[in-house]
Image (cartoon, coloured by chain):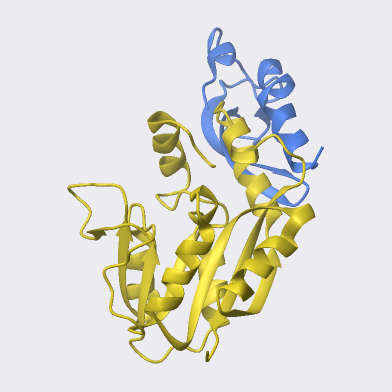
Chain colours: A blue, B yellow
Amino acid sequence: MTLDSANKAPWHCAACGIPLEKAKVQIAYLGSAFPVDLLRCSRCGIVFIPEELALTRMAEAEKILEDK
Amino acid sequence: MLYSTAAGQRHLCAMTGGIMRPGGFSLTDRAIASCSFPAKGRVLDAGCGTGIVVEHLRSHHGLLACGIDIATCASRPFAQASVYSLPVKTGALNGVLCECVLSLLPDAGRALREFGRVLAVDGYLILSDLYDREQQGCMRELLQCCGFSIILWEDHTKALRELGALMALQGLDHTTCLETKKSTGYYLAVARKDTC
């Protein structure tokens, strides 16, 4: 998965103050889990989901899993 | 049909670790567990693709597995043949697997009769494929008409949807995976060749 929109500017964790790093993250929905490359804080583990991803691919994947 | 282009085929292959269909090895293993194959039983993967399931059957189930596929591939150590005309003697096999292939064929009944020819009496046919959930009786009837008794029939549409969701997350066209009909599902079936 590309992180085009997220890569335009460096993102930092507001709580830890360190740059987010690209990491393989498990996204779970309705009992199914998928490995996705996202930006994550290596200290606290918080994950950044770009708006573009949430509104397009992720929304489409949710729709498929919901059987709609 | 899970893919319609060479590029789509490559993406699907990479995403599924070469197995290129919903459910991965777990569906194959589940079907094998419901069969009573003899030690070193002879099984054929009809439409073996990359041959990854053939290797799995050999290494994890101790079966004498081989594969055929209509597609040519120089690096693939399996025979090129049509499922309508298998290069196998009549009654020579303990099992035939045909995973995510039957729905692509113009004449599924002809393929099922050919599977029946190469199977020994009480041999097992393992199928997993796309189907119309509103018309599952059609496939069951076809199996029975071709001389098979169904011993396992399970719906695994969730596995199909998970593959579609993974394709969507990767930004790939998943419409070929899920077709356009809401009733498209995925089944796993095990059938035994009847005595006569």
Establish if B192 lies above or below A12: below
Question: Which one is nearer the viewer's eye here, B128 or B53?
Answer: B128
Quadrant assignment, res A3: top right
Quadrant assignment, res B169: top right
Report the residue at 51% width, 51% height from top: B21
Picture quarter with the N terminus of chain B: top right
- Percent position (x, y) of residue B19? 44, 53
Q: In this view, does A49 lie to the left or right of B87?
A: right
Question: Which one is nearer the viewer's eye here, A60 or B175?
Answer: B175
- Percent position (x, y) of residue B122? 50, 89
Report the residue at 38% width, 60% height from top: B83
Residue extending furthest toward the top: A8
Establish if A17 lies above or below B157: above
Report the residue at 65% width, 61% height from top: B187
Q: Is residue B68 left or right of residue B115?
A: left
- Percent position (x, y) of residue A62? 75, 35
Establish if B15 lies above or below B127: above
Quadrant assignment, res A49: top right
